[in-house]
Image: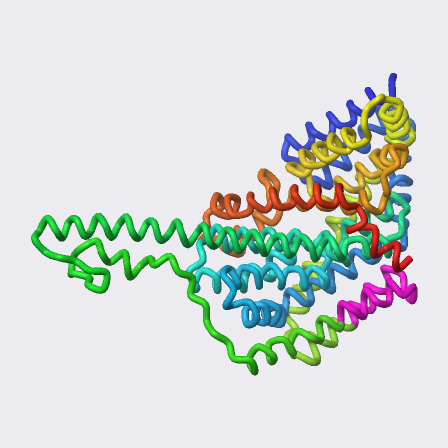
């Protein structure tokens, strides 16, 4: 049987398992066992255990539960609100400043946690209620936090980049360095969109007020009365003027307050520098840097800020165990499928066919991006990266693309999947912590950021040095 046909059958089995509603990890495990039975023979099913061990027998994977624990300690304490408060103090007078502060807080939190869902949950619980109080629409508020959460898999330390580095055997340190500048640029792009979106929101609200005022004025005129904006005759529709002004309330902060808020987050900036600095300096491996981060965040949150109680810490440990187990199970079973595909020579065959085609390599890259976007609609980033990297890596190398650059492009594609239904993880995380906001409003508020991320992919494709410059400089 042709390798590509075998690969298509394995993909069909996995898709059927997903559609039957099996949990993703178990669907991948089922697919891997069936694939071994079908293509390697029933007598080889015992290879499943060996393949699982081979897929997880990597010291680099130790970084994942450690970074997850670091993020959970920070997000599960009362300290994460300091990030948002600092952003609010410095950006409150800018149009959309409160929403921008949630994006900036998400970017900093991402540099501590490496997890998108943890970032969305930690910042969303603090930021969205505050934005609602200040007059932001639910769509703008929820959309900003959902999009900001996606930075968790791009800005280092990133679980997704760790898995890509292990699957492709590329330097995780270089991948982390490559994610820094794109993370900053996308953060700025998100803030620019917020500035535009809040302006549109305010103009829309103002038009509604003007229209309802005109209706109320006409009603008063018909009754022989004159109405001004300052007046609000009892029993008329002009009460809308007191309910809905279209303005966002922006408090004023004194300079001492701003500096105090900034000082409170400086220890976490030190934490980020310490963790990533030890990695970039070559002093520690990613796993060792993650261990340093766990110790430092425990000292900061638990001792310096006293923001961690005994029961909270127990819950954090349980959550970390659950999340890490899920990630590692998906990694193990996805790795088995990747090993089976490699044994069947599916990646090699695909790379050979594509490189022999008389097609511009950027056409192939566009197709790869579209495939990744579609996969992101249905699968979490972890499973996509582990399954797809062994297939695409020989292909991009054959086409002459930089594998570090491609790792960042793939990660941005995964960001899109986090805020697009039906599986967009950040959408459901926010719905869980903000049950009063309709899922439709969370989705509609997030969709514009899909376009922003699409622009980012185009930007980094035209100017790849934005990704490669820092790792080339450091390494």
| Vertical position of residue 105 compared to residue 471: above or below | below
The front one of 308 and 115 is 115
Q: Is residue 42 visible?
A: no
Residue that lies at the very extreme toward the top in this rendered image:
1
The front one of 350 and 466 is 466
| Vertical position of residue 432 compared to residue 282: above or below | above
Residue 196 x %, y %? 51, 52
The front one of 360 and 320 is 360
Magenta range is 271-295
Residue that lies at the very extreme toward the bottom in this rendered image:
256
Q: Quadrant of the image for the C terminus?
A: bottom right
Residue 27 x %, y %? 72, 35
Quarter of the rendering containing residue 245: bottom left
Quarter of the rendering containing residue 233: bottom left
Q: Is residue 290 magenta?
A: yes
Judge from the rendering whether residue 170 lies leftward or rightward of residue 218; answer left or right: right
Please tell me whether the stretch drawn in magenta is mainly helix, strand or loop.
Answer: helix
Q: Can residue 144 be seen in this view?
A: yes
Q: Which residue is drawn at 87% across and 18% down?
A: 2
Q: Quadrant of the image for the N terminus?
A: top right
Judge from the rendering whether residue 443 lies leftward or rightward of residue 27; answer left or right: left
Residue 269 x %, y %? 72, 71
| Vertical position of residue 442 compared to residue 340: above or below | below
């Amino acid at each position: 049987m042709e390798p590509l046909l075998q690969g298509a059958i394995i993909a069909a089995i996995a898709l059927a398992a997903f559609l039957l509603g099996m949990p993703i990890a178990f669907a991948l495990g089922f697919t891997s066992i069936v694939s071994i039975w079908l293509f390697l023979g029933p007598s080889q099913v015992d290879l499943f255990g060996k393949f699982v061990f081979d897929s997880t027998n990597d010291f680099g994977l130790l970084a994942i539960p450690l970074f997850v624990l670091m993020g959970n300690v920070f997000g599960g304490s009362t300290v994460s609100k300091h990030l948002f408060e600092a952003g609010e103090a410095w950006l409150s007078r800018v149009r959309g400043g409160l929403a921008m502060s949630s994006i900036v807080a998400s970017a900093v939190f991402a540099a501590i946690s490496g997890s998108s869902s943890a970032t969305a949950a930690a910042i969303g619980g603090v930021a969205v209620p505050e934005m609602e109080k200040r007059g932001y629409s639910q769509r703008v508020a929820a959309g900003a936090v959902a999009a900001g959460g996606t930075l968790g898999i791009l800005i280092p330390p990133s679980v997704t980049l760790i898995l890509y580095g292990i699957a492709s055997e590329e330097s995780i340190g270089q991948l982390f360095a490559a994610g820094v500048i794109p993370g900053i640029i996308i953060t700025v792009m998100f803030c620019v969109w917020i500035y535009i979106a809040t302006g549109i929101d305010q103009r829309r609200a103002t038009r509604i007020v003007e229209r309802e005022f005109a209706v109320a004025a006409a009603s008063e005129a018909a009754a022989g009365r004159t109405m001004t904006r300052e007046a609000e005759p009892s029993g008329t529709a002009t009460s809308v003027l007191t309910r809905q002004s279209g303005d966002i309330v922006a408090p004023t902060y004194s300079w001492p307050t701003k500096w105090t808020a900034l000082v409170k987050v400086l220890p976490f900036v030190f934490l980020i520098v310490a963790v990533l600095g030890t990695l970039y300096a070559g002093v520690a491996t990613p796993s060792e840097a993650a261990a340093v981060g766990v110790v430092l965040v425990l000292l900061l949150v638990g001792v310096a800020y006293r923001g961690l109680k005994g029961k909270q810490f127990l819950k954090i440990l349980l959550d970390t165990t659950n999340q890490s187990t899920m990630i590692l199970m998906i990694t193990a079973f996805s790795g088995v499928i990747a090993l089976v595909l490699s044994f069947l020579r599916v990646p090699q065959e695909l790379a050979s066919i594509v490189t022999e085609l008389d097609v511009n390599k950027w056409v192939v890259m566009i197709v790869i991006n579209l495939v990744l976007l579609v996969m992101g609609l249905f699968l979490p980033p972890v499973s996509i990266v582990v399954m797809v990297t062994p297939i695409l890596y020989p292909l991009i190398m054959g086409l002459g693309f930089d594998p570090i650059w491609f790792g960042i492009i793939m990660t941005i594609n995964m960001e899109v999947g986090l805020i697009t239904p039906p599986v967009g993880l950040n959408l459901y995380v926010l719905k869980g912590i903000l049950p009063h906001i309709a899922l439709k409003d969370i989705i509609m508020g997030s969709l514009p950021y899909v376009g922003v991320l699409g622009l980012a992919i185009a930007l980094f494709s035209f100017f790849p040095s934005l990704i490669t410059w820092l790792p080339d400089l450091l390494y």
